[in-house]
Structure formats: C-alpha cells, structure tokens
Image (cartoon, helix red, strand yellow):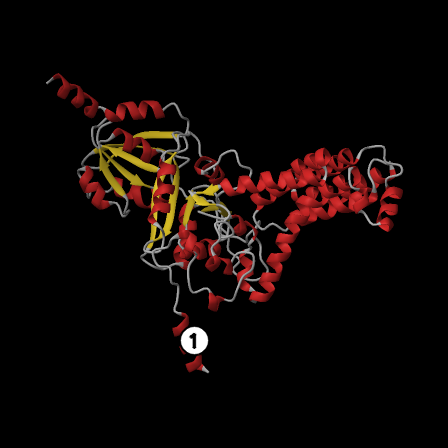
C-alpha cells in the first residue's frame, strides 16, 4: 500500500519537477490565460517554437469557446501531432523538441503537448567535397528529414526501411539507419543497429562521431565506413545491399560495410563510358601509389642505392644537392611538413585568404628554400607532384590517410633503404588484411579473391555485365536484372 501511495505521489505532481527545472532558463515561457469556460496555463521554449504556428493556429484555438477539456482542445487545434500525457520524461523531451505544453491547472497531472517546432535548415545546395561536372548537383544538408526526402525521391519503394534512434544523453541526436528490405543482408543491418544502440556518449554532434564509435578497429588510420554527401551515391549503394546511417545535424551519410577500393572510386565514374571511367580509376590508383612511395624512394636511393640511379640523372641530382647541408631524410621531412602546414592553414583560413596563402605561400617558400640551399629543386618537384597526386582521392578521409602514410615510409626508407620500404609495405598489407568493415574483410574483392566482384573494383566494366550485386554483401536478391532478357529486348528494339 505504501508503494502504491509513493507511485501516486510521483504521478500526481510530475509537471512541478519539470517546470521548476526549466524555469531557470531565460528562454522558457510560462503564463496563464482563460476563455469563457476554463483557465489554462501553457509553457514552451520561445527559441524552439515557431511563432507563426503559435499565433495562427494554437492561440486562436485556446481563446475560442469551443472546448472545455484538454481532449476538447486537442480536437479544436488544427495540428496533427498532439499528445495527451502524464509521463514526466515525455513532457521534458517534447518541450525540448519544440512542443507547447498546455494544462488546466498550474501544476496539473495531465497536459497537452502540441507540436510547434521551429525548423531552420539551409536549402539543398551543390556538393562541396564530391563535386562532379556531370550528374545530379544535390548534396545532403543538416536536416535529417530533408536528407531522408532526398533518398525517398530516388528510391520510391516501400522496401526502403528507415529505423530511427536517439543517442547522446545531452544532445539526444536523431540517427536514422537505412536499408532496402529483401536486398540487404539482415546480419549487416543488425550489426549497425546493435553498435549504435551500444554507444555511450553524452554529445553526438556529427556523423564522424558515429564513425569512430562503431568502426571495427578504432586504432586504424583507415576509415572503415564510407562517408559521402551525395544522395545519388547513397541511393545506388543502398540498392546494392548496404546499410546507410544518417545523423541529424550532419550533411554526410555513412555507408557500410565498405572496402578499400571503394574509397578510390568516384561516383562520376558511372556517368562516363566504361573505358574512360576505368582509365580514370587506374590513374587515380597510380596517383595514390605515387604519392606514398615517390619521396621514400628518393630518400632510399640517395642514402643507400646510388647504383640504381642512371648516370645522367645522378649528375643532375649531385649538382642540385651540392649546396644542401641536410641529409635526404631531413630535406624530405622539411618539404613534406611545409606542404602539410600550407594545406592546414589554407583549410582553416577564410576561403579567399586560404587560396592566396596556398598559392603564394607555396611559391615563395619553395623558391626561397631552394635558393637558401635547404632543399634541392628536384625534391621540391617530387614533393609537389606527390602532394598533387594525393588530392586525386575522391573521399576526403582517405586522402588524409594517404598523406599520413608517407611519413612511416620515409622513416623506413632512411632506416633500411628499399628493403625498409618493402618491409613497411608488408606491415601495411598485413594491417589491411586484418582490417574489417562491420565484420566484412576490408580488402574484398582482392582478398579474399572474388572474381565476380572484380567487375567494379580496380576497373569498371559496362552496365550490361553488372547483372549481379556484389557477392561480398550477401544480398537477399543477388540478381539485379536478367542479361538474357535485356539482350532480347535490345534485339527487338533493333
């Protein structure tokens, strides 16, 4: 009996606890008014409420004489999302989400929660990180509702499943998990759902927080989830059988499981002829290898392997380094760090100033360092080409990883020469072989080898040969279309 009484006490005065805590905030409004029948109290956060909805829909209904109870008021207000409740947690969450609370006594037991949320979001704009000359020109924004709308327009099918969660004790951030039923492997979906549910963190501000918290290996420099701002790319990848993660407040969507080769594949590749697209993709992969290895090879050759350099080139190298007092390693580190400083300064400064710093700073510092005898002009060209090659990576997070990898290769090249480069490459390969994305091998389809999935990895074959979805995803429907039927239709048209 005592237990029942204590529970009743908690239920009888729930709003007192909520209102008294929120009154300390300057933007919390609470006041009373009445019509001919009843007196009422309503409370809300003025910074979260749309004043137009309040003035045109809620206040006229409150002042009218068409209602005498909260249930009657619910029917009188022309707003769809209205909730009658006594639950303290619900009241607190809804007030903080932009709802207006109405009670018939100052600290009543029941209250009516009316949605009047103020939604401020920027309009859909051009992609800034994954810009393309051809194809759609839409990018995700910070509003999760707008982002879901962009996907719904591209996949207008009831099989598109969206599961919404709320994480973060303080931020209470909305997270949406997307997949296409009957195509996605349910194990992948459950893995993402479980990992997000297990997140214990008070503030989730961006999708990058989720990336770090649900990745398989938190200590790896390689991103294990694909981060994109393009709705067309997300829709295409969902149709393959992958899982997407949207975070409210973030203009980027996470996709998994992913593989290493996908980070070097731009979505523009699918807008060109397969021959041109394959050539561009191979150039991109060569650029990545060039960016990582060219400076370490320079250090190794000048430190240990003069005999590998042709005589004509060796004479040029000797003449360019005649006035340089630094060993090749320090010379290379000086230029590499200078490039990184210029890149970071250009990224942090305002756009116009950053562009000026990047161009003028690179020219002035490069020329001055050669004239001062700190570096050779040949290494300056090599480092500049290496930095330029690193920017060909379509995914920004992978570009950061590629630039970072140059430094351990440089140290190994100084230590053991070409043998050190091979040893460092072995360590890198071993790490990639052990790396997984949502439990799936990160090097697929290269290892474990899947010949059927190679059609869209290092090169891209024609769409007519992509009748099957990637085997690595274990899709529920592995067949995308019938090649035989497509050929018959083509023959009929001809």
Which of 95/329 is in front?
Answer: 329
In this figure, which residue is indicated by the disc labeled 1? 487
| Secondary structure state at the residue bearing disc 1 | helix
Quadrant where the N terminus is found in the figure: top left
In the image, is residue 14 above or below residue 274? above
- 170 left or right of 359 in image: left
Indicate the position of residue 320 as horizontal and vertical percent values. Answer: 87, 43
Categorize mark 1 by other alpha carbons within 10 Å: few (<14), some (14-19), many (20+): few
- Using the rendered view, name the quadrant where residue 471 is placed: bottom left
Which of 454/461 is in front?
Answer: 454
In the image, is residue 472 above or below residue 363? below
- 43 left or right of 315 in image: left
Residue furthest to the left in view is 1
Q: Is residue 325 visible?
A: yes
Q: Identify the residue at image location x=73%, y=43%.
A: 297
Indicate the position of residue 432 as horizontal and vertical percent values. Answer: 53, 42
In the image, is residue 135 above or below residue 56? below
Residue furthest to the top in view is 2
User: How many numbered discs sit on the rendered protein?
Assistant: 1
Q: Is residue 404 visible?
A: no
- Using the rendered view, name the quadrant where residue 45 is placed: top left
- 160 left or right of 316 in image: left
Indicate the position of residue 449 as horizontal and vertical percent values. Answer: 49, 53
Which of 351/428 is in front?
Answer: 428
Which of 133/82 is in front?
Answer: 133
Indicate the position of residue 186 as horizontal and vertical percent values. Answer: 33, 48
């Amino acid at each position: 009996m005592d237990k029942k009484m204590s529970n009743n006490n908690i239920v009888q005065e729930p709003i007192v606890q909520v209102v008294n805590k929120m009154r300390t905030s300057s933007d919390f409004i609470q006041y009373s008014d009445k019509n001919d029948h009843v007196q009422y109290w309503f409370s809300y956060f003025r910074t979260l409420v749309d004043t137009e909805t309040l003035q045109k829909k809620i206040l006229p209904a409150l002042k009218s004489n068409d209602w005498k109870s909260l249930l009657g008021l619910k029917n009188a207000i022309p707003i769809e999302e209205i909730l009658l409740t006594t639950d303290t947690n619900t009241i607190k969450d809804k007030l903080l989400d932009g709802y207006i609370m109405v009670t018939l006594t100052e600290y009543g037991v029941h209250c009516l929660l009316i949605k009047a949320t103020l939604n401020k979001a920027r309009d859909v704009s051009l992609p800034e990180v994954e810009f393309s000359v051809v194809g759609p020109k839409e990018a995700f924004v910070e509003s999760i509702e707008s982002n879901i709308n962009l996907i719904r327009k591209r996949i207008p099918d009831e099989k598109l499943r969206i599961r919404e969660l709320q994480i973060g004790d303080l931020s209470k951030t909305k997270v949406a998990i997307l997949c296409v039923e009957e195509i996605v492997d349910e194990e992948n979906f459950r893995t993402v759902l479980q990992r997000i549910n297990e997140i214990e963190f008070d503030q989730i501000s961006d999708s990058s927080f989720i990336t770090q918290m649900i990745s398989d290996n938190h200590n790896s420099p390689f991103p294990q989830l694909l981060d994109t701002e393009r709705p067309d790319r997300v829709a295409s990848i969902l149709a393959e059988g992958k899982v997407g993660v949207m975070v409210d407040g973030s203009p980027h969507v996470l996709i998994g499981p992913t593989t290493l080769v996908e980070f070097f594949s731009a979505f523009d590749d699918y807008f060109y002829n397969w021959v041109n697209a394959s050539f561009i993709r191979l150039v991109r992969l060569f650029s990545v290898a060039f960016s990582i290895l060219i400076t370490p090879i320079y250090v190794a050759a000048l430190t240990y392997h003069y005999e590998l350099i042709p005589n004509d080139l060796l004479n040029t190298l000797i003449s360019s380094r005649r006035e340089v007092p630094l060993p090749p390693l320090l010379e290379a580190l000086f230029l590499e760090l200078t490039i990184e400083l210029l890149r970071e300064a250009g990224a942090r400064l305002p756009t116009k100033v950053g562009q000026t710093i990047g161009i003028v700073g690179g020219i002035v510092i490069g020329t001055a360092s050669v004239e001062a005898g700190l570096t050779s002009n040949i290494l300056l060209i090599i480092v500049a080409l290496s930095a330029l090659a690193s920017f060909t990576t379509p995914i920004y997070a992978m570009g950061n990883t590629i630039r970072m990898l140059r430094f351990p290769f440089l140290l190994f090249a100084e230590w053991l020469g070409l043998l050190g480069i091979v040893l460092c490459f072995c360590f890198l390969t071993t790490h990639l072989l052990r790396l997984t994305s949502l439990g799936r091998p990160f090097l697929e389809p290269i290892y474990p080898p899947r010949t059927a999935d190679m059609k869209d990895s290092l090169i891209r074959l024609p769409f007519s040969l992509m009748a099957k979805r990637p085997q690595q995803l274990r899709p529920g429907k592995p067949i995308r279309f019938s090649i035989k039927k497509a050929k018959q239709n083509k023959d009929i048209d001809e």
